[in-house]
Amino acid sequence: MDHYHAGAALGISVGILAGLFVIVLLFKKKVLDMHFDERQERARGKAFQYGFFTLLIAVYAYGVSDVMFGKWCDVLTGVTLCVAAGLCVFAVTCILKDAYLSLREKPRTVMTMFALLSLLNLGIGGRHAWSGELVEGGVLTFRAVNPIIGFATLVILAVYIVNHLLRSREEEAE
Amino acid sequence: MKNLRLKAARAALDLSQQQLADDVGVSRQTINAIEKGDYNPTIKLCIAICRRLGKTLDELFWEG
């Protein structure tokens, strides 16, 4: 392993550890919570099922595309794309079934967090795109991980807001 | 099928869906789904709702 790859591996590892630390902290501070009622548990079970099968199909499609067209993206980017697809399907299904946020989570706080996460990742992605590091030699580099995560969180945020607005209107009509 | 008896019993006590949901430990959307007939609650939740509203299972959930 050369210095560049060792540095990249160290950077990614530190990033993952920092992310885990922030998530644990948010759970400790009760910003994130995992207490769901029986209807939500059932709905989330179905959503997990959809998300899992989406992940399987996405991983297989990625593998087939790699065989058919050759290397078109770094493995980390491909894996992130598959995970993002699975997560989006899971999250959107949960949102549509009113089972995304737990009983104790505050919608505004969680969605603000999503907006920040999305902006940060899309910003980093934009910077990489500007400097031409996103695609090198026709291959989508591992730097595309940030914009993929940013786009996935943006999709979840948008679906949550639209669903919230539509539900509010329905309830007012009732 | 809509559960109008549940809605009426809740309204009689001047409780909002949110208040009832908080009292029985579920989300407001779950109470809404039960009232609209979109969700069949477990017996455990039915009993909790009956206790809170001072009704029997028959009065709220039996479709005779």
Image (cartoon, rainbow, N blue to C red):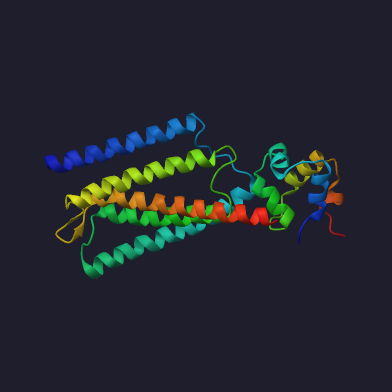
Could you say where residue A173 lies in the image, as x and y percent from the top left? Answer: 67, 57
Residue at x-position 40% and y-position 60%: A56
Q: In the rendered image of this protein, does residue A118 appear above or below residue A89?
A: above
- The C terminus of chain A lies in quadrant: bottom right
Query: Could you say which is closer to the camera, residue B17 or residue A169?
Result: A169
Residue B39, quarter of the rendered image: bottom right
Query: Could you say which is closer to the camera, residue B18 or residue B55?
Result: B18
Could you say where residue A97 lies in the image, as x and y percent from the top left? Answer: 58, 55
Residue ranking furthest to the bottom: A68
Residue ranking furthest to the left: A2
Left or right: A164 in relation to A8: right
Residue A149: in sight, yes or no?
A: yes
Residue A45: in sight, yes or no?
A: no
Left or right: B19 in relation to B56: left
Q: In the rendered image of this protein, does residue A137 appear above or below residue A119?
A: below
Q: In the rendered image of this protein, does residue B5 appear above or below residue A6?
A: below
Could you say where residue A72 lies in the image, as x and y percent from the top left? Answer: 22, 62
Residue A104, quarter of the rendered image: top right
- The N terminus of chain A lies in quadrant: top left
Residue at x-position 84% and y-position 59%: B63
Residue at x-position 86% and y-position 45%: B56
**Tally of numbered discs:** 0
Residue at x-position 16% and y-position 43%: A5
Left or right: A74 in relation to A34: left
Could you say where residue A86 lies in the image, as x and y percent from the top left? Answer: 42, 56
